[in-house]
Structures are given as C-alpha cells and as structure tokens.
Image: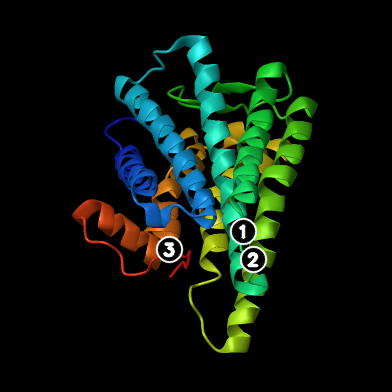
C-alpha cells in the first residue's frame, strides 16, 4: 500500500506471488494425491486456502499502489476490507486447529476423524465470517488505509465503537487462538522431552504468529489509546506489509516444512510416489 517504486511494495508483491503459488500448490496437491487426503491435513489446506485469499488481497493493494489511487470506489473498499479480514482471521484460527490436531496426534495418540476435522474447519470459516461482517453492520468500520490504496479496519477514530470491537476481536481471534497454539505445542514439546525425540520445532508456529500479526495488533491497540496521526504514514503501513508475508511463512511451516506433505507435493510434481502408504503430519 506504498508507492509502486518503493522497496516495501516490491517485497509485498513478491511475497504475495510466492505465497499464492506455494499455497496453491499445497491445495492442488491435496486434491490430486490420495495419500495427502487425511483428516489431519485438512486444517493445513484451510490455512493454505485462507493464505491464498490474503495474497489476492495483497495483489489488489499492489495494483492500486501502482495506479497510486484506489480505483474500485467505496463499495470496492468495503469488499476489500471484508475479504482481507475474513482470510486473515481464518488463517490464524486454522493455524490453531493445526496445533490442536498436533496435540491429539502426538500426545493423546487418538485419530482425528473426518467429521471432526470438517466440522472444525467449517466453524473456523463461519466464525471468521461473523467477525468480518461486523464492520459492515456498524460495529467497527472498514475504510481506506492512510495512503488510500487499500482498505482495512479503520483505526484512525479511536472511538468507543472501535475500541469495543477491537478488544473483542483481539480476544476471540488472536489471544484465544494464540493460547491454543501455545498450550498445544508446549504439551507436544513435553512429550518429545519424555521420549527423547524432537520431531519438529514446537516454538516456530507461535513465533511465526507473533512476528506476522503482532505488529498489526500493536498498531491497533496503540490507536485505541493514542492519536495515530503522529505516526508517519509509511510507518503505519509496515505492519500490513509484515502481515502479508504470513502466507509464505505458513507455506514453509505447514506444508513444505512437513516431511510427508512435502513428499506428496513431490509426487504431484514429478509423479514419483511417496514411500509411506499414509501421510502423517510431522512439521519438521
């Protein structure tokens, strides 16, 4: 959402293109390779689908940055804000479902059934849609970002309407998913310590969540207590650019970083069948 000649915009555009290709590959591989079609992999596909949506949102922002104005009007701004929020919230919540699945896979050794996995994914998207539609109904508001080349939650007002929506949004869509991820991966880490075998970096998913979405949360909370007009416009855009890198980070974390899922992708690309009859979800 910066000028097209700026390095941050080029980084955002490249990250969006890379993230879209990698997550698209994740989705297509799941669809084509039977070994990947397990209940535990469905939340990974949900993350990938949401991340593709984030990338599309970034493409639109990059194009308007190239034009140096928003060409889609007020209705287009509302749609862009809704679509960006929906996919961002779904990506975060789907990551929490992946963490929940990892906990059951490694700690309880109970097999997650298709009905459970499908129900959780549907809930994630309906829950995300609920919070994303609230600004369209008057609780919160979608508006142009400072440089007026993309749209998101309007944090410039800092009134009671914004503050109440912000705190509810943060609790249910960032803190709770983050808590689920933290406790789930801590339990998995303790299990790894007991058996003396660490199968993946249990701290990486939570760190990725904080790095990608933490700056956005800090900006929103700062706007709730202080006047953001004192922050330079281009500096206000930094959290958005960092958040747009999450699709690429998630692709390397959940699919390409997963030894067996990576094997399924390799099978899709080359036709060489993976050795294992069933693909488990181990994030290496």
In percent of width and height, residue 134 lies at 70, 24
At a point 35% along the width and 26% down the height, the residue shown is 65
Asked if the residues shown at circle 1 and circle 2 are in contact, with their CB atoms under 8 angstroms apart, the answer is yes
In the rendered view, how is the structure colored? rainbow
Sequence-earlier tag: 2 or 3 = 2
Relative to 90, 164 lies left or right = right
Q: Earlier in the sequence, mark 1 or mark 2?
A: 2
> Can you identify the residue that label 3 sits on?
279
Q: Are dots 1 and 3 in contact, CB under 8 Å?
A: no
Label 2 environment density (alpha carbons within 10 Å; few <14, some 14–19, many ≥20): some
Which quadrant: the N terminus? top left
Q: Position of residue 74 (x, y in %)?
A: 52, 11
Q: Is residue 59 above or below residue 44?
A: above
Are there few (<14), some (14-19), or many (20+) residues within 10 Å of tag 3?
many
Residue 87 visible within the image? yes
Q: Which label was assigned to residue 104?
A: 2
Place of residue 135 in the rendered image (x, y in percent of width and height, measured from the top left): 67, 23
Q: Nearer the viewer, residue 198 or 232?
A: 198
Q: Secondary structure at mark 2?
A: helix
Q: Is residue 188 above or below residue 56?
A: below
Q: Residues within 10 Å of mark 1 (few under 14, many from 20)?
A: some
Which label sits on residue 112? Answer: 1
Q: Position of residue 22 (x, y in %)?
A: 33, 48
Question: How far apart are the two marked residues, 1 and 2, measured between alpha carbons?
Answer: 8 Å
Query: Would residue 12 appear left or right of 236 to someone viewing this image?
Result: left
Disc with the residue nearer the chain's start (1 vs 3): 1
């Amino acid at each position: 959402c910066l000028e097209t000649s700026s390095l941050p915009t080029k980084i955002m555009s490249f990250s969006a293109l890379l993230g879209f290709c990698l997550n698209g590959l994740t989705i297509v591989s799941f669809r084509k390779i039977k070994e990947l079609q397990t209940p535990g992999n469905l939340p990974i596909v949900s993350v990938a689908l949401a991340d593709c949506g984030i990338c599309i949102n970034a493409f639109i922002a990059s194009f308007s940055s190239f034009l140096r104005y928003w060409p889609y009007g007020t209705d287009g701004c509302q749609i862009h804000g809704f679509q960006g929020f929906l996919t961002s919230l779904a990506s975060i919540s789907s990551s929490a479902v992946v963490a929940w699945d990892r906990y059951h896979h490694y700690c309880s050794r109970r097999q997650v059934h298709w009905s459970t996995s499908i129900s959780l994914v549907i809930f994630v998207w309906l829950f995300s849609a609920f919070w994303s539609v609230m600004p369209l109904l008057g609780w919160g508001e979608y508006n142009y970002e400072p440089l007026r080349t993309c749209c998101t939650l309007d944090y410039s007002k800092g009134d009671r309407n914004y503050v109440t929506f912000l705190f509810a949004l943060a609790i249910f869509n960032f803190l709770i998913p983050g808590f689920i991820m933290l406790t789930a991966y801590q339990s998995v880490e303790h299990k790894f310590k007991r058996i003396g075998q660490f199968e993946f970096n249990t701290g990486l998913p939570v760190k990725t969540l904080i790095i990608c979405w933490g700056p956005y949360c800090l900006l929103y909370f700062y706007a709730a207590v202080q006047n953001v007009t004192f922050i330079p416009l281009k500096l206000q855009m930094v959290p958005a650019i960092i958040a747009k890198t999450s699709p690429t980070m998630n692709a390397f974390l959940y699919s390409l970083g997963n030894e067996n899922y990576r094997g399924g992708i390799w099978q899709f690309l080359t036709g060489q069948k993976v050795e294992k009859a069933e693909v488990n979800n181990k994030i290496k």
